[in-house]
C-alpha cells in the first residue's frame, strides 16, 4: 500500500466553529473514501489554524464494484410481449440490449434488473472529486465567498498538496491546484516553501516553526504553564474549553505571564475571569487560593522580544477591566432596582420580566411548603431580586453573568448570604443547587418557564428546542430527586395552573416524565414500565427505576421477569380482588399464600420487590400444578385474587409487561 498525504491550506480558521465540527471531520472523509471504493487504513487527521492534514494508506486502484440497476415492474416494461418506453429507458440507462435484461423480485414485484461489474479505477484521478465533496460536507455554520468565485467555505483556501508516496498528484479544490509547497509560520516568511518528498514536508514544517500535531501543541502549552507556576509560585486555572481553543489558534505556542493593576481586583472574580477568557483568551491565575492580578496568555509568536507582546496584552486587558470597574462601581451606587423590570419585555404573550418574577414568587411560596422551608421573607426577597441584575450595566456587558452579578450586589445591599446564593444558583442546570432556598428559587424559575411556554404552545418538536425546555425539565427532576421531597408532579402543576392560560397539563407532565430517560443508563423499557405504573411522585419513580436497574444484575432476572409477566398477563385489568384463605383447596396454592403472608412490606421499594421475587419457585410450582380456569367459579375467582394479591406489589412499582430486551 502507498501512503497518501493531503494538506489543505486556509486562512486562519476561527476556533469555535472549527472545534464544533472537528469531531466529525475524519468520519466525513472516511465515508467519502468508502463511497469511492477506496480501500484505506490508518486514516489520520492533524491540524493547525491554517491547514488540514490527512494521511492514510491505500492501493493505487479502487476496489472492484458491483452496480445494481433496478427498473420498472415487468408488467409496466412489457405490454403484450413488447417492450415499452419504460423498458427502453432502462436499457439505455444500463447500456444493454433488450436480450440482456434480467428480472429481480423487489418489494414483492418482479422488476427489470441488471448487475454491472466495474473494475477498480486508478485513484490518481479521484482526488479532485473526493476533496471537493469532503470540503462541501463540512458544516462550520457561516461560510464566506472570496474573490470573484461562487464557492463558499469557512475561510479562503490558500494551498493544496496531494501526494501518493513522494509523487505529486494532480488535484484541484476551489480553484487551487495541488503543488508541493506549503506555508510555514508567518514570522519566518509570507511565501510558500517548496518540498519534494513527504519526509521533506514534515521537515519544512518543523524548521518553519509549525507544530502540526495539536497534542504536541497541548503538551508545549501545559509544560510552559507548569514552569510559570513553579517559577512564580502561582496556580493557573486550566479551563479545558479555553485550552482547546488556544491549541486551535496557534501553530507555535508560547506561554507568557502578564499582570494588571491590583485595583481591578475590587471587581467580582467572575467578571475578571470572564473578561480575560471570552475577550482575550487568557488563563486566570491564583495565588494562595485567591484570584491574583496576573494572567497567562498563549502567544503564537516566537519573537525574541516577548516583553513587547506581554505589554501589548496587558494594555488591551487594562482597557477591558477599566470598563468593568466603571460598571461595577456605578451599579453598586445605584443598587438593584427590581421595578425597572416592569419595562423589560419577557415575551409578547407573557408580559414583562416583572410579570415572570411575580409568577415565580407564587410558585416559590408553594414550593417552600413542600420543602418545609419556613422563612417566607427570604423566599420573597430572593425572588424579588433574582432577575434585577438584568438591568445593570455589568450584565449588559457580560450577559452570561446574570445571577452571578446579582448575587454580589444583594450582599453589598445588606441581604443575607443565603439569598445571595439562591440568586446565583437559579440558572444552574448541570450542577445541583447547594441549599434549600436555591432549590426553591431554581425550581420556581424553571416551572414558570415550562408552564408559561406550554400555555402559549411554544412546545419543543423534533430536535428543535429554542427555549431549552427539555433541559429545564431534566433539571427539575434532578433537583427534586436530590432533595428527596414528597413531590407529586401532576398535582403540583394543577395547583399553579390558574395563573396561566389554559392548556392540557398532562402534556407537560408527560414531557417532564420523558426526561427520566436522560437520567439513567438503562434499557428504556424499564423506565416505560415504571411510568406505566402511574406513579406521580418523582422520588418513587426514581427509586423504582433504580430498583429494576439493581435487580437486572441478578443472573436469574430474566427468568423472574418471565414468571411475573405471566402473572401480569393473567390479571390484566382486574383490580381489587380479595383472596379468601378459606377457599384455597390445593396444597400448592396454600403454600404460596402462606409464604406471601410471611413477607413484611415497608417503604424500601427494592426490598419489597426482592421479597416478592423470592416467591418465584412457589409461583412456578403453582402454575405447573394448579389450574386457574376451573368450573367452580368461586375457586377460579379466588385463584385470580391470589395472583392479583401477589402481583399488585410489583404493579405498584412497574408494569412488567412493558419490559423487553429487544
Image (spheres, helix red, strand yellow):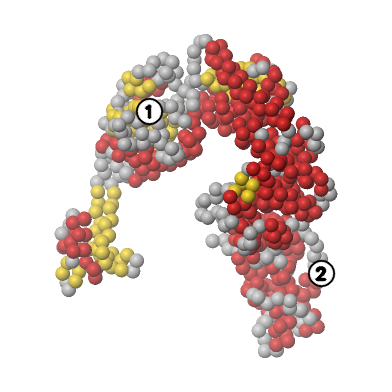
Circle 1: element type = strand
Quadrant of the rendered structure where residue 619 is? Answer: bottom right
The answer to whether residue 257 is seen in the rendering is no
Q: Position of residue 311 (x, y in %)?
A: 57, 14
Tell which of 408 and 537 is nearer to you: 408
The quadrant of the image that shows the N terminus is top left
Tell me the residue that label 1 is attached to.
Answer: 9
Give the residue at x 57% y 61%: 661
Residue at figure coordinates x 67%, y 24% from the top left: 325
Q: Secondary structure at mark 2?
A: loop
98 above or below 8?
below
Location of mark 2 (residue): 598
Q: Quadrant of the C terminus?
A: bottom right
Residue 482: where, in percent of width, then height?
Answer: 73, 49
Q: Position of residue 262 (x, y in %)?
A: 69, 18
* Viewer-side residue, 311 vs 530: 311
Tag nearer the camera, 2 or 1 = 1
Circles 2 and 1: CB atoms closer than 8 Å: no
Amino acid at each position: 500500500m502507498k501512503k497518501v498525504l493531503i494538506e489543505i491550506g486556509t486562512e486562519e480558521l476561527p476556533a469555535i466553529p472549527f472545534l464544533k465540527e472537528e469531531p466529525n471531520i475524519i468520519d466525513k472523509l472516511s465515508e467519502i473514501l468508502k463511497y469511492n471504493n477506496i480501500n484505506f487504513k490508518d486514516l489520520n487527521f492533524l491540524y493547525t489554524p491554517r491547514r488540514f492534514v490527512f494521511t492514510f494508506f491505500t492501493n493505487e486502484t479502487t476496489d472492484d464494484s458491483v452496480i445494481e440497476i433496478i427498473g420498472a415492474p415487468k408488467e409496466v416494461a412489457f405490454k403484450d410481449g413488447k417492450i415499452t418506453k419504460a423498458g427502453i429507458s432502462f436499457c439505455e440507462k444500463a447500456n444493454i440490449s433488450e436480450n440482456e435484461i434480467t428480472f429481480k423480485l423487489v418489494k414483492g414485484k418482479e422488476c427489470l434488473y441488471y448487475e454491472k461489474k466495474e473494475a477498480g479505477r486508478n485513484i490518481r484521478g479521484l482526488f479532485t472529486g473526493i476533496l471537493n465533496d469532503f470540503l462541501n460536507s463540512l458544516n462550520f455554520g457561516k461560510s464566506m465567498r472570496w474573490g470573484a468565485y461562487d464557492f463558499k467555505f469557512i475561510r479562503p483556501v490558500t494551498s493544496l498538496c496531494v501526494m501518493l508516496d513522494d509523487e505529486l498528484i494532480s488535484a484541484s479544490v476551489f480553484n487551487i491546484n495541488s503543488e508541493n509547497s506549503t506555508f510555514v509560520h508567518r514570522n519566518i516568511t509570507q511565501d510558500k516553501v517548496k518540498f519534494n518528498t513527504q519526509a521533506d514536508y514534515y521537515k519544512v514544517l518543523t524548521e518553519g516553526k509549525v507544530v502540526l500535531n495539536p497534542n504536541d501543541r497541548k503538551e508545549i502549552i501545559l509544560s510552559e504553564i507548569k514552569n510559570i507556576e513553579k517559577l512564580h509560585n502561582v496556580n493557573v486555572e486550566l479551563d479545558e474549553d479555553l485550552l482547546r481553543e488556544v491549541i486551535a489558534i496557534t501553530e507555535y505556542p508560547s506561554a507568557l505571564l502578564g499582570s494588571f493593576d491590583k485595583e481591578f481586583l475590587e471587581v467580582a472574580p467572575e467578571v475578571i475571569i470572564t473578561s480575560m477568557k471570552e475577550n482575550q483568551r487568557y488563563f486566570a491565575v491564583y495565588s494562595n487560593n485567591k484570584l491574583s492580578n496576573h494572567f497567562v496568555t498563549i502567544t503564537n509568536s516566537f519573537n525574541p522580544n516577548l516583553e513587547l507582546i506581554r505589554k501589548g496584552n496587558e494594555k488591551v486587558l487594562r482597557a477591558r477591566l477599566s470598563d468593568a470597574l466603571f460598571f461595577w462601581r456605578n451599579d453598586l451606587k445605584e443598587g438593584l432596582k427590581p421595578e425597572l423590570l416592569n419595562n423589560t419585555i419577557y415575551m409578547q404573550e407573557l408580559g414583562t420580566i416583572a410579570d415572570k418574577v411575580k409568577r415565580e414568587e407564587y410558585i416559590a411560596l408553594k414550593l417552600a411548603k413542600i420543602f418545609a422551608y419556613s422563612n417566607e421573607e427570604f423566599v420573597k426577597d430572593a425572588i424579588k431580586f433574582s432577575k434585577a441584575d438584568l438591568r445593570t450595566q455589568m450584565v449588559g456587558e457580560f450577559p452570561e453573568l446574570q445571577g452571578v452579578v446579582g448575587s454580589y450586589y444583594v450582599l453589598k445591599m445588606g441581604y443575607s448570604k443565603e439569598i445571595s446564593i439562591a440568586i446565583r444558583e437559579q440558572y444552574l442546570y448541570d450542577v445541583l443547587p447547594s441549599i434549600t432556598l436555591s432549590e426553591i428559587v431554581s425550581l420556581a424559575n424553571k416551572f414558570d418557564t415550562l408552564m408559561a411556554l406550554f400555555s402559549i404552545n411554544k412546545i419543543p418538536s423534533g430536535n428543535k428546542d429554542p427555549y431549552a425546555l427539555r433541559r429545564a425539565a431534566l433539571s427539575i427532576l434532578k433537583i427534586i430527586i436530590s432533595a428527596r421531597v414528597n413531590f407529586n408532579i401532576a398535582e403540583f402543576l394543577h395547583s399553579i395552573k390558574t395563573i396561566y392560560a389554559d392548556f392540557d397539563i398532562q402534556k407537560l407532565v408527560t414531557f417532564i416524565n420523558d426526561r427520566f430517560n436522560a437520567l439513567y443508563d438503562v434499557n428504556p423499557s424499564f423506565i416505560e414500565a415504571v411510568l406505566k405504573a402511574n406513579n406521580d411522585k418523582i422520588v418513587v419513580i426514581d427509586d423504582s427505576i433504580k430498583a429494576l436497574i439493581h435487580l437486572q444484575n441478578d443472573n436469574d432476572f430474566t427468568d423472574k421477569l418471565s414468571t411475573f409477566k405471566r402473572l401480569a398477563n393473567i390479571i390484566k385489568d382486574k383490580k381489587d380482588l380479595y383472596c379468601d384463605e378459606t377457599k384455597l383447596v390445593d396444597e400448592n396454592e396454600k403454600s404460596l399464600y402462606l409464604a406471601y403472608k410471611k413477607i413484611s412490606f415497608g417503604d424500601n421499594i427494592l426490598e419489597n420487590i426482592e421479597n416478592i421475587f423470592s416467591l418465584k419457585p412457589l409461583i412456578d410450582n403453582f402454575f405447573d400444578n394448579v389450574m386457574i380456569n376451573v368450573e367452580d367459579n368461586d375457586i377460579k375467582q379466588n385463584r385470580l385474587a391470589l395472583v392479583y394479591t401477589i402481583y399488585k406489589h410489583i404493579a405498584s412499582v412497574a408494569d412488567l409487561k412493558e419490559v423487553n430486551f429487544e
